[in-house]
Every structure is written in C-alpha cells, then in structure tokens.
Image (cartoon, helix red, strand yellow):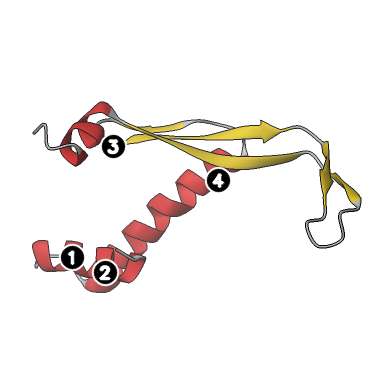
C-alpha cells in the first residue's frame, strides 16, 4: 500500500472528513515520525511496531567491480521491529 492508497482508504472509511484533511493528517503523522527519528528518538506504535535508528560504524569495504578497498563512513539507518500483535496476525494467530 502506498501513501495515496492509505489516504483514500481512510477517507472512504470516514466520509465526514475531507480527503485533503485526511492527507494532511497522514502527512503530519509521517513527518512527526521522521522528525523524531532524526533526533534519535524511538517511535513506538502499540500493536504495530517500533521505529528506531541504528548506528553503523565506519568500516573498510570492497568495491565489487574492481576489488579495491573503500572507506565506508559511519551512518545512521532506520530500523523497524514488529509488534507482537502484527507478528501474530501475519502468522495467522489472530
């Protein structure tokens, strides 16, 4: 599901809301999650999962084409851990 499909689904399920308002709500939620993660905070949505940021240390890598060594800088990457409810639903344990 992409963002526009999510907006459409919420708008269809809530006919009393305008689609532009639903779009603003969805965008605000995603912006807040992104901002919190950029600060290094953890975002937990009960029953769904938790978003966090993991640090990858600098290392020496290898260019697969040429085989030469390359210095890879330290970086921060997003990480998602599913919640128990989501994991159970995916595995058919409703």
Residue 53 found in image quarter: top right
User: Residue 87, relative to residue 72: is it above or below?
Assistant: above
Q: Residues within 10 Å of mark 4 (few under 14, many from 20)?
A: few
Q: Nearer the viewer, residue 94 or 67?
A: 67
Element marked by disc 2: helix
Distance between the alpha carbons at the discs numbered 3 and 4: 19 Å
Residue 9 found in image quarter: bottom left
Would residue 3 be found to the left or right of residue 73 on screen?
Answer: left
Q: Nearer the viewer, residue 70 or 39?
A: 70
Distance between the alpha carbons at the discs numbered 2 and 1: 6 Å
Q: Earlier in the sequence, mark 3 or mark 4?
A: 4
Which label belongs to residue 35?
4
Q: Are the residues flagged by discs 3 and 4 in contact, CB closer than 8 Å?
A: no
User: What residue sits 67% from the left and 32% below the top?
Assistant: 55
Q: Earlier in the sequence, mark 4 or mark 1?
A: 1
Location of the N terminus by quadrant is bottom left
Where in the figure is residue 4, as x and y percent of width and height? 32, 71
Would residue 70 be found to the left or right of residue 8 on screen?
Answer: right
Element marked by disc 4: helix
User: Residue 37, relative to residue 21: is it above or below?
Assistant: above
**Residue hosting label 1:** 9
Q: Which label lies toward us, 3 or 4?
A: 3
Residue 16 found in image quarter: bottom left
Where in the figure is residue 94, as x and y percent of width and height? 8, 33
Q: Which label lies toward us, 2 or 4?
A: 2
Distance between the alpha carbons at the discs numbered 2 and 4: 23 Å
């Amino acid at each position: 599901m992409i963002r526009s499909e999510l907006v459409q689904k919420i708008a269809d399920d809530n006919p009393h809301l305008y689609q532009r308002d639903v779009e603003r709500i969805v965008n605000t939620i995603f912006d807040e999650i992104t901002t919190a993660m950029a600060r290094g905070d953890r975002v937990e949505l009960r029953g769904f999962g938790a978003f966090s940021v993991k640090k990858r240390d600098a290392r020496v890598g290898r260019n697969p084409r040429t085989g030469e060594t390359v210095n890879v800088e330290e970086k921060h990457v997003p990480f998602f851990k599913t919640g128990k409810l989501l994991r159970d639903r995916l595995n058919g344990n409703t």
